[in-house]
Amino acid sequence: MKKLLRQLKRPEIFSLAIASLFAIIILLQWLNPPIFATQPRKRADILEQVWKTVNDNFYDPQLNGVDWKAMRKKYKPLATRTQSSEEFATVINRMLSELQTSHTHFYTQNEQKYYQLLGIFQPRNQNLQKQLKRFLGTEKIEYAGIGIFTKKINDKTFISGILAGTPAAGSDLKVGDRVISVDGKPYESIKSFAGKVGKKVKLLVQRTPSIDSQQEINVTPKMFDPSKMFLDVQKASRETIERNGKKIAYVHIWSYADTKYQEQLEEDLLYGRFRNADGLVLDLRDGWGGAAPKYLHIFTGKSPNITFIGRDRKPVNNNSQWKKPVVLLVNEGSRSGKEILAFGFKQHKIGPIVGSKTSGAVVGGSPFIMKDGSVLYLAVADVLINNKYRLEGNGVKPDISVPFSLEYSQGVDPQKQRAVEVAFKAVMGNGD
């Protein structure tokens, strides 16, 4: 030790030690930059990128009459003062909300919808795949979770949807449960389950307004690939409800943003498990839109029936239409292309619509990757139905309105119950 101290007294050794110390400090600052020095600049840069992307790509060049330059001035200082990515995203979304347009939202990697949205667009966008690999380390988009959707009501988190066939569906969790915590920490859709795949997590939920109804439920998270997940849960949601010798088919389509969902529905109705059903309840509540108007052809009979006659001269009908009763189930979470289907359902008088008014979110959206890997989902095209009807901001009203109070509903689904009742009345010849 004494020898080392004597060496440090030598000027050249002392200078080298000081230089090395400064080098280490600089390296540590580069690897772990101080929030007060770099984060405000970084967030200002992202806000500027969001602002410019909107300015250059929003479907209305007049930006819905909003003074967009004034919005940048208003929200930039707020954004630079935020202390977390969640706070920053909140400020950005407040700025975007000034446009009063759907399909316009800022998502971070801390949200399930970030991965779900990218999973929808990635298969048909090679450039998006390349960009994502830079931030995710892989072109594969996936996240850890248990299979629930949640909704904030008065700063409380409630389970608004449970995907069939997922860990949550196999547990005692129910729609309407208030989520208090996950493993003793506040619920976060991504962080609560990250790194816990295959391991049990403990959710503390509350079943009624009374604190005495709190209980702990164990669930084991799994990895979800959103490009495959929604088809899997659509299949898992299928059920046949029997009553008085009649059968009602039920299926929940959470995402309609690919033809594979419609192809599966048609396969089930015409040739598969529902071919002998007497009626159908088609549930389009919540999730994602993307449906094409042509999906109604199976109900409207726009395509011809074809009969094949072989050597034995026996005719075989290739039925491409569903001519039995069908009930459409919608709510305020039914959006975009699903709303166009609901509009067409009414226009062609296919069957009754049950539930609550749709969200009125019908414009064309596209994702833009920001320089930090976050996603700006932006309305890039307006949408008119039959060249005159605009559903954006209006939505579609159901024929039979059924209120649904989510909080502490304990898994009871009055909208689905009513839709099934209406379907049974229709197949028995005394429709509602």
Image (cartoon, helix red, strand yellow):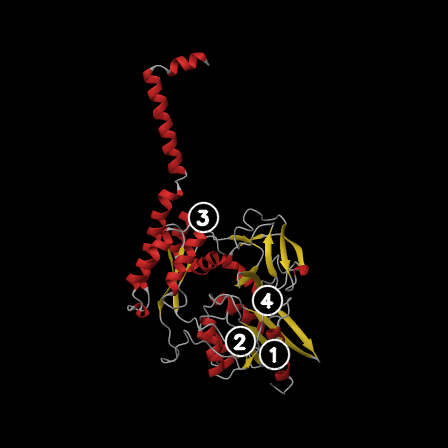
Q: Quadrant of residue 4?
A: top left
User: Which quarter of the figure has residue 174?
Assistant: bottom right
- Amino acid at dot 3: Thr
Q: Position of residue 153 (x, y in %)?
A: 53, 64
Residue 148, visible in the rendered structure: yes
Question: What is the distance, in whole Å, between disc 3 and disc 1 at their CAs?
Answer: 44 Å
Distance in Å between CA atoms under marks 2 and 4: 16 Å
**Front position among marks 3 and 4:** 4
Say whether disc 2 or disc 4 marks the residue closer to the N-terminus: 2
- In front: label 4 or label 1: 4
Mark toward the start of the polypeptide (2 vs 3): 3
Q: Amino acid at mark 2?
A: Ser
Query: Residues under labels 2 and 1: Cα distance?
Result: 21 Å
Q: Earlier in the sequence, mark 2 or mark 1?
A: 1
The residue labelled by disc 1 is 279
Q: Which residue is mark 2?
A: 356
Q: Residue at x 36, y 25 (%)?
A: 20
Q: Which mark is residue 138?
A: 3
Crowding near the residue tagged with mark 3, few <14, some 14–19, many ≥20 C-alpha atoms within 10 Å = few
